[in-house]
Image (cartoon, rainbow, N blue to C red):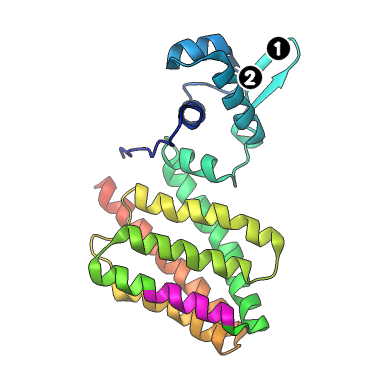
Amino acid sequence: MSVEPAVPRGLHGQVVHTIGLSIVSGDLAAGEQIVPEEIGARYGVSRPVVREALRVLESKGMVAARPKTGTRVLPVERWNLLDHDVILWRVQGPGWESQLRDLLDLRAAVEPMAARRCAESSDDTRAKGLADRCDEMEQAVRSNDSQAFTRADIEFHTLLLAGAGNRVLAQISGAIEAALKARESLHLMPDHLGHEAVSSHRHIVDAIAGADPDRAEAAARALIQVAGAEITERLTHIAI
């Protein structure tokens, strides 16, 4: 599948993005030394810009700088696979199908538990915030605006994870955001958005508002199962 990458603004962001994609695609292979002068010449940027970009990639676990040996590309096992940028680069690379399935597994592991915690705390303000996001999704369905739907969807799931009262889960929201963005960038959204997509989210809100942890957990799990089935169906059409 051909995916048009979203390139960040600014020279520094573009260099980070380009090198990151080169690593994910294998153009810069694990163990390969990165020489700033060569990278600068390849992409037409100064050495300081390249060095700053490499520091960002090092913070993501994709490269490592060592005395005498210089900067080398690290294997995928060392990457911060929950990093927002790393996720988006991976879904633009050759292993995008497996990355999507990994992200679905992550959601299945954390979102039902987050929904349960939200229902246990029974916070009216949080429930209203989730309901408002559902209203925004409903409006996006009416106008068949997939970008607006994705924005509201991301805000919904961010609120859900934050509402669990677990700071670790709250930090995972960046990975969930990237997963939902990837669905749109890979053109895996339905051609016409359906109201059932909103209903599945409202089931979670109703359970949280009703302080029913079991129903909230089950509703979140059902939503992710539907999302997985939709992606599988779209992948099948693409393969055909």
- Label 1, label 2: how many angstroms apart (C-alpha)? 8 Å
In-image side of 82 versus 155 (left or right): right
Which residue is at the front of the view, 230 or 145? 145
Residue at x 42%, y 65% (from the top left corner)? 152
Q: Which residue lies furthest to the front in this view?
A: 10
C-beta proximity under 8 Å, tags 1 and 2 = yes
| 210 lies above or below 167 | below
- Residue 202 in the image, given as x and y percentages of width and height: 44, 80
Magenta segment: 125-135
Residue denoted by label 2: 72
Please tell me whether the stretch drawn in magenta is mainly helix, strand or loop. helix
Residue at 46% of width from left, 10% of height from top? 41
Mark 2, Cα crowd under 10 Å, few <14 / some 14-19 / many 20+, is: many
From the viewer's perspective, tell me whether residue 20 is left or right of residue 142.
Answer: right
Kind of residue sitting beneath label 2: Arg
Q: Read off the residue under disc 1.
A: 69
